[in-house]
Amino acid sequence: FGYGTAAMSMFKGGKKVEIDPMMIGIACGAAMAAGYLARSLLTDIAMLIKTKHIAAEEVKERAAIQRAASADELKAVDMPPWTFEAKMAARVKRQEEQNKIQKETIEEFAAARRKVTVRVPATTANLGPGFDTIGMALDMWSEVTVELSDKFEIINKGDGADAVPTDESNLVVVALKKAYAMAGKEVPTLKYTCTNRIPYARGLGSSSAAIVGGIIAGLVLSGHKLKMWGAEELLQIACDIEGHPDNVAPAIYGGIQLGIHDGQRWRSERVNMPAGLQVVVFIPNTIGKTSDARKALPKEYSIKDCVYNIGRIAWLVNALATNHLDNLKFGVQDKLHQPQRGEKVYRHLMPMIKAAESAGACCCYLSGAGPSVLAITSGQSGDIFAQREKERVDRAVADAMLAAAASAGMDGEVFITNPILSGAYVAEVSPSFSSGLVTYKGDV
C-alpha cells in the first residue's frame, strides 16, 4: 500500500514529479507497520478462537469425568493431560471402594453367627396349568437349626425322618454349601437339626423348604448377605439346585409367585392373593416321587393342548388379580400333566376334584407332582373358630374330599390352613441381631 502511494505521487497529474527519498522511506515504513499490525491482529483472533475451543473441550471432558458414577467409569473416560485433578479424584474413589470392600469383609466376619434356626413354609406348585412356573406359600412350616459343632451330624425329626438322608447329600447341607461358596468361605463343622412339619414327598414343597432353609442358614452363619433387588441372588442359588422356581420362589418370598428364566437369570413376580382364602389339602398316607410322576407325562404335546394351557394360566392369573374367585375353577384346568397323572398314577385325583368343587370349593387341583390334592375355598373372616361355619365351606369340602378318596381306595387325611403372604425367616440366632434399644421381631 505504501509503495503504491509513493508511485502514484511520482506521476501525479500525468507529470513526473521529483519526490524526496525521505518521503518514500516514511511511506514504506508506514506500510510495513500497518501490515505487521494487521497480521498480529489476525493471529491474536485465531489464537483466541483456538483457546476458547480448547477450554470448551476441557469443560466437556471435566463434565464427563464428574458424571462418572464409579471408578470403572472414570477409567473409561479419555482424560487429557491437563485433567490431573480428575485423575487424582479417580484414584481416591478407587481407594474408597477398596476400603469399603475391606470394611464389608471385616464386618462379615464380625457378623458370623454360631447357631441359627430358619423356618420355611410349605408350598403348592403348578396351581393346575402353571407347570413349573407358579406356586403359593402355605401356613405350614418346617424348621432347620444349624450350629457350630466338633463333629458333623444330622438329626431328622417329624415327617419322613427315616427317609431323609443323614449325610452330605441332604438338601439342607447341599444348599448351605452353596451359601458358603457365595461368601467365599470354607464350611465349618456343623450340626443340623431338621424338624419336618411339611409332609415328606407329598407335593407340598418339602425339598424346596430344605433348600431355602439351608441357604439362609448358611448366609447367617457365614455373615454373608446377597443382593436381592434387581438380582434375586438367593432365588438363583435355590433354582440352580431345584431346577425350577414354582416352589422355591414362594418359599423365599411368600404369597403367590410367578417365575420364569429370561435366558440370563431367574425372575419372579408376586401375583395378587385375594383375601379370605383357605386351603383344604388331602394328604395321602403314601408318598409320591416327582421322578415317577414325571414319567407319566408324554414327550410331546399337541398345539391344541398347549394353547389350552396358555389360555388357562392367563385366566388363572387374571382371576387372582381381579379377585374373581368364581373364575378360579376354569383357571386351574389343565391338559399337560393332571389328566395324565390322574390316569396313570393318582386314580383319586379326578374324582376328588369333582367332589371338592361340587361341595363349594372355588377350585381344586393336584398339588405339585402329587399325590396331595388341594382345594381353595373362600369366606374366612377373622379367626375361623369364632366364625359361623355356614359362612364358609372348608369343612364340607374336606368331608367331600375324604369320601372321594375312600371311594378311590386312597387312605389319607385332610389339613385345613391358609395361604401365607410371608416366606422363610430366621426364628432364632446366636448371637442375637437385636441389641440395645433395637429389637427385631421375635427378639431375633
Image (cartoon, rainbow, N blue to C red):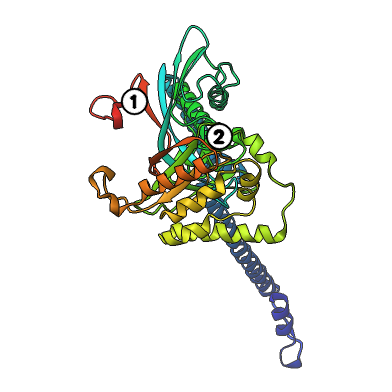
Residue at image location 49% in from the left, 47% down from the top:
257
Classify 10 Å Cα crowding around label 1: few (below 14), some (14-19), many (20 and above): some
Q: Position of residue 169 (x, y in %)?
A: 60, 21
Q: Position of residue 352 (x, y in %)?
A: 51, 48
Q: Earlier in the sequence, mark 2 or mark 1?
A: 2
What kind of residue is marked 2?
Answer: Ala
Q: Of residues 164 and 354, which is closer to you in this image? A: 354
Q: In 3D space, how far apart are the residues under numbered discs 2 and 1 (Cα atoms)? A: 25 Å
Residue at image location 32% in from the left, 52% down from the top:
392
Name the quadrant of the N terminus: bottom right
Snapshot quadrant of residue 429: top left
Name the quadrant of the C terminus: top left
Q: Position of residue 346 (x, y in %)?
A: 59, 41
Q: Position of residue 39 (x, y in %)?
A: 65, 66
**Residue 67 visible (yes or no):** no
Give the residue number, with chain letter if any, for mark 1. 433
Residue at image location 41% in from the left, 16% down from the top:
114
**Residue 417 visible (yes or no):** yes
Give the residue number, with chain letter if any, for mark 2. 238
Which residue ends up furthest to the top in the rendered image? 150
Q: Is residue 312 above or below residue 373?
A: below
Which residue ends up furthest to the bottom in the rendered image? 13
Query: Are dots 2 and 1 in contact, CB under 8 Å?
Result: no
Secondary structure state at the residue bearing disc 2: helix
Secondary structure state at the residue bearing disc 1: loop
Q: Of residues 275 and 378, which is closer to you in this image? A: 378
Q: Nearer the viewer, mark 2 or mark 1?
A: 2
